[in-house]
Image (cartoon, rainbow, N blue to C red):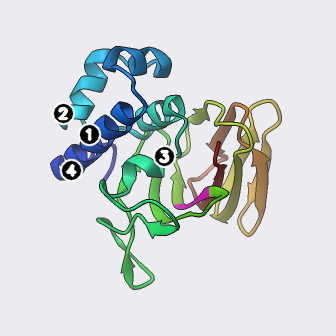
Amino acid sequence: MAGAASAGLSARIGLRLRELRASRGLSLSELARRSGVGKATLSGLESGTRNPTLETLYALTTALGLPLSAVLQDSGRAAGPEVSGRAAGPEVSGRTAGPEVSGRVLDAVLLERFEDAAAVSETYRVRIRPGGVQRSAAHPPGTVEHLVVLSGTALVGAESSPVPVAAGGHHTWAADVPHRYEAVGAGVEAVLVIRHPHG
Protein backbone atom coordinates (compact mmCIF):
# COMPACT_ATOMS: atom_id res chain seq x y z
CA MET A 1 0.00 0.00 0.00
CA ALA A 2 1.38 3.44 -0.78
CA GLY A 3 0.33 6.15 1.66
CA ALA A 4 -3.03 4.70 2.64
CA ALA A 5 -4.29 1.79 4.67
CA SER A 6 -7.15 -0.52 3.74
CA ALA A 7 -10.49 0.10 5.45
CA GLY A 8 -10.08 -3.08 7.51
CA LEU A 9 -6.59 -2.13 8.62
CA SER A 10 -7.71 1.42 9.47
CA ALA A 11 -10.52 0.03 11.62
CA ARG A 12 -8.19 -2.41 13.46
CA ILE A 13 -5.59 0.28 14.10
CA GLY A 14 -8.30 2.71 15.24
CA LEU A 15 -9.70 0.20 17.72
CA ARG A 16 -6.21 -0.53 19.04
CA LEU A 17 -5.45 3.20 19.44
CA ARG A 18 -8.67 3.70 21.41
CA GLU A 19 -7.84 0.71 23.66
CA LEU A 20 -4.31 1.98 24.33
CA ARG A 21 -5.48 5.55 25.03
CA ALA A 22 -8.17 4.29 27.43
CA SER A 23 -5.69 1.98 29.20
CA ARG A 24 -3.51 5.05 29.88
CA GLY A 25 -6.51 6.98 31.22
CA LEU A 26 -6.15 9.73 28.60
CA SER A 27 -8.95 11.69 27.00
CA LEU A 28 -9.03 12.24 23.25
CA SER A 29 -8.12 15.90 23.85
CA GLU A 30 -5.16 15.04 26.10
CA LEU A 31 -3.63 12.55 23.66
CA ALA A 32 -4.13 15.03 20.82
CA ARG A 33 -2.33 17.70 22.87
CA ARG A 34 0.58 15.43 23.86
CA SER A 35 1.10 14.07 20.33
CA GLY A 36 0.51 17.25 18.33
CA VAL A 37 -2.11 15.37 16.27
CA GLY A 38 -5.35 17.29 15.77
CA LYS A 39 -8.32 16.13 17.84
CA ALA A 40 -10.48 15.70 14.71
CA THR A 41 -7.73 13.62 13.07
CA LEU A 42 -7.36 11.45 16.18
CA SER A 43 -11.14 10.97 16.41
CA GLY A 44 -11.23 9.92 12.75
CA LEU A 45 -8.35 7.48 13.28
CA GLU A 46 -10.02 5.89 16.29
CA SER A 47 -13.32 5.52 14.44
CA GLY A 48 -11.52 3.97 11.44
CA THR A 49 -12.68 6.68 9.03
CA ARG A 50 -9.20 8.17 8.47
CA ASN A 51 -6.17 6.38 7.04
CA PRO A 52 -3.24 6.31 9.46
CA THR A 53 0.13 7.52 8.18
CA LEU A 54 3.42 6.37 9.61
CA GLU A 55 4.20 9.88 10.90
CA THR A 56 0.85 10.12 12.73
CA LEU A 57 1.15 6.66 14.29
CA TYR A 58 4.70 7.40 15.45
CA ALA A 59 3.54 10.68 17.03
CA LEU A 60 0.68 8.94 18.85
CA THR A 61 2.64 5.91 20.08
CA THR A 62 5.51 8.15 21.21
CA ALA A 63 3.02 10.27 23.19
CA LEU A 64 1.65 7.07 24.74
CA GLY A 65 5.19 5.92 25.59
CA LEU A 66 4.74 2.78 23.47
CA PRO A 67 6.50 1.21 20.48
CA LEU A 68 4.84 1.49 17.06
CA SER A 69 4.12 -2.25 17.07
CA ALA A 70 1.66 -1.69 19.94
CA VAL A 71 -0.89 -0.38 17.39
CA LEU A 72 0.07 -2.80 14.61
CA GLN A 73 -0.32 -6.02 16.59
CA ASP A 74 -3.70 -7.72 16.92
CA SER A 75 -5.85 -6.32 19.73
CA GLY A 76 -6.70 -8.70 22.55
CA ARG A 77 -3.39 -10.60 22.28
CA ALA A 78 -2.23 -12.05 25.58
CA ALA A 79 0.50 -10.21 27.45
CA GLY A 80 3.90 -11.69 28.13
CA PRO A 81 6.63 -13.07 25.87
CA GLU A 82 5.33 -13.10 22.33
CA VAL A 83 6.10 -12.85 18.67
CA SER A 84 3.41 -10.96 16.81
CA GLY A 85 2.73 -8.78 13.81
CA ARG A 86 1.81 -11.65 11.50
CA ALA A 87 -1.84 -10.80 10.98
CA ALA A 88 -2.09 -9.21 7.56
CA GLY A 89 0.49 -8.34 5.01
CA PRO A 90 2.83 -9.64 2.36
CA GLU A 91 4.57 -13.00 2.58
CA VAL A 92 8.03 -12.83 4.11
CA SER A 93 10.10 -16.05 4.15
CA GLY A 94 7.03 -18.28 3.79
CA ARG A 95 4.87 -16.56 6.39
CA THR A 96 2.70 -13.46 6.59
CA ALA A 97 4.29 -10.24 7.82
CA GLY A 98 2.45 -7.44 9.58
CA PRO A 99 0.69 -4.60 7.79
CA GLU A 100 2.66 -2.07 5.77
CA VAL A 101 2.26 1.49 6.99
CA SER A 102 3.41 4.32 4.77
CA GLY A 103 4.46 7.89 5.33
CA ARG A 104 5.73 10.71 3.16
CA VAL A 105 9.30 9.32 3.09
CA LEU A 106 9.29 5.96 4.87
CA ASP A 107 7.33 2.71 4.42
CA ALA A 108 7.54 0.06 7.15
CA VAL A 109 6.38 -3.56 7.43
CA LEU A 110 6.43 -5.12 10.89
CA LEU A 111 8.20 -8.48 10.55
CA GLU A 112 8.60 -9.53 14.18
CA ARG A 113 7.68 -8.28 17.64
CA PHE A 114 9.23 -9.98 20.66
CA GLU A 115 8.45 -8.98 24.23
CA ASP A 116 10.14 -10.26 27.36
CA ALA A 117 10.50 -8.96 30.91
CA ALA A 118 13.14 -6.40 29.91
CA ALA A 119 12.02 -4.90 26.60
CA VAL A 120 10.00 -4.97 23.40
CA SER A 121 12.09 -5.66 20.30
CA GLU A 122 10.65 -4.93 16.86
CA THR A 123 12.02 -5.83 13.43
CA TYR A 124 10.81 -3.90 10.37
CA ARG A 125 11.51 -4.08 6.65
CA VAL A 126 11.74 -0.41 5.64
CA ARG A 127 11.90 1.53 2.40
CA ILE A 128 13.22 5.10 2.43
CA ARG A 129 12.18 7.14 -0.61
CA PRO A 130 14.53 9.83 -1.96
CA GLY A 131 13.70 13.52 -1.88
CA GLY A 132 12.75 13.98 1.76
CA VAL A 133 13.70 13.38 5.38
CA GLN A 134 11.77 11.37 7.97
CA ARG A 135 12.32 13.03 11.35
CA SER A 136 11.33 11.12 14.47
CA ALA A 137 10.84 12.53 17.94
CA ALA A 138 12.81 11.09 20.84
CA HIS A 139 11.54 7.71 22.04
CA PRO A 140 11.49 6.82 25.78
CA PRO A 141 14.88 6.66 27.57
CA GLY A 142 17.04 3.67 26.67
CA THR A 143 15.47 3.03 23.24
CA VAL A 144 18.06 1.90 20.68
CA GLU A 145 17.70 1.54 16.88
CA HIS A 146 19.85 -0.55 14.54
CA LEU A 147 19.60 -0.24 10.74
CA VAL A 148 21.07 -2.71 8.24
CA VAL A 149 21.06 -1.30 4.69
CA LEU A 150 20.26 -3.83 1.96
CA SER A 151 20.43 -1.47 -1.03
CA GLY A 152 21.14 2.21 -1.58
CA THR A 153 22.74 4.62 0.88
CA ALA A 154 20.95 5.99 3.94
CA LEU A 155 21.76 8.98 6.14
CA VAL A 156 20.46 7.93 9.57
CA GLY A 157 20.90 8.37 13.29
CA ALA A 158 20.71 11.21 15.77
CA GLU A 159 19.52 14.45 14.18
CA SER A 160 22.66 16.19 15.44
CA SER A 161 25.07 13.67 13.90
CA PRO A 162 23.55 11.44 11.17
CA VAL A 163 25.81 8.80 9.59
CA PRO A 164 25.88 7.68 5.93
CA VAL A 165 25.40 3.90 5.61
CA ALA A 166 25.88 2.14 2.25
CA ALA A 167 24.49 -1.24 1.15
CA GLY A 168 25.91 -4.02 3.33
CA GLY A 169 26.61 -1.61 6.20
CA HIS A 170 24.82 -0.91 9.46
CA HIS A 171 24.50 1.75 12.14
CA THR A 172 23.26 1.73 15.73
CA TRP A 173 22.14 4.83 17.63
CA ALA A 174 20.37 5.91 20.81
CA ALA A 175 16.81 6.72 19.71
CA ASP A 176 15.89 8.60 22.90
CA VAL A 177 16.93 11.78 21.08
CA PRO A 178 15.43 13.23 17.86
CA HIS A 179 16.63 11.16 14.90
CA ARG A 180 16.25 10.93 11.14
CA TYR A 181 16.11 8.70 8.07
CA GLU A 182 17.08 9.93 4.60
CA ALA A 183 17.89 8.24 1.28
CA VAL A 184 21.01 9.60 -0.40
CA GLY A 185 20.45 9.46 -4.15
CA ALA A 186 18.30 6.42 -4.97
CA GLY A 187 15.81 4.77 -2.63
CA VAL A 188 16.95 2.59 0.26
CA GLU A 189 15.81 -0.88 1.31
CA ALA A 190 16.78 -1.83 4.85
CA VAL A 191 15.98 -3.78 8.00
CA LEU A 192 15.35 -1.75 11.15
CA VAL A 193 15.49 -3.26 14.65
CA ILE A 194 14.20 -1.17 17.57
CA ARG A 195 14.61 -2.17 21.23
CA HIS A 196 12.32 -0.41 23.71
CA PRO A 197 13.14 -1.16 27.36
CA HIS A 198 10.13 -1.39 29.70
CA GLY A 199 9.62 1.43 32.16
Magenta span of residues: 120-124
**Rendered image quadrant of residue 57:** top left
In the rendered structure, are the residues bearing label 2 and label 1 in contact, judged by CB atoms less than 8 Å apart?
yes
The residue wearing badge 2 is 47
Q: Circle 2 sits in a helix, a strand or a loop, which is it? A: helix
User: What label does residue 6 carry, if any?
Assistant: 4
**Rendered image quadrant of residue 159:** top right
Quadrant that contains the C terminus: top right
The residue under label 1 is which amino acid type? Gly
User: What label does residue 184 carry, if any?
Assistant: none
User: What label does residue 68 carry, if any?
Assistant: 3
Residue sitting at the far bottom? 94
Q: Is residue 92 magenta?
A: no
Quick check: 35 left or right of 163? Answer: left
- Rendered view: 2 above or below 44: below
Q: Earlier in the sequence, mark 4 or mark 1?
A: 4
Give the label, 4 or 3, closer to the camera.
3
Q: Earlier in the sequence, mark 2 or mark 1?
A: 1
- Rendered view: 171 above or below 60: below
Residue for point 67% across, 57% down: 118
Residue for point 69% across, 31% down: 178
Q: Circle 1 sits in a helix, a strand or a loop, which is it? A: helix
**Numbered label tally:** 4
The residue wearing badge 1 is 14
The residue under label 4 is which amino acid type? Ser
The residue under label 2 is which amino acid type? Ser
Q: Circle 3 sits in a helix, a strand or a loop, which is it? A: loop
Residue for point 52% across, 55% down: 127
The residue under label 3 is which amino acid type? Leu
Q: Tell me how far mark 1 sits from mark 3, CA to CA.
A: 13 Å
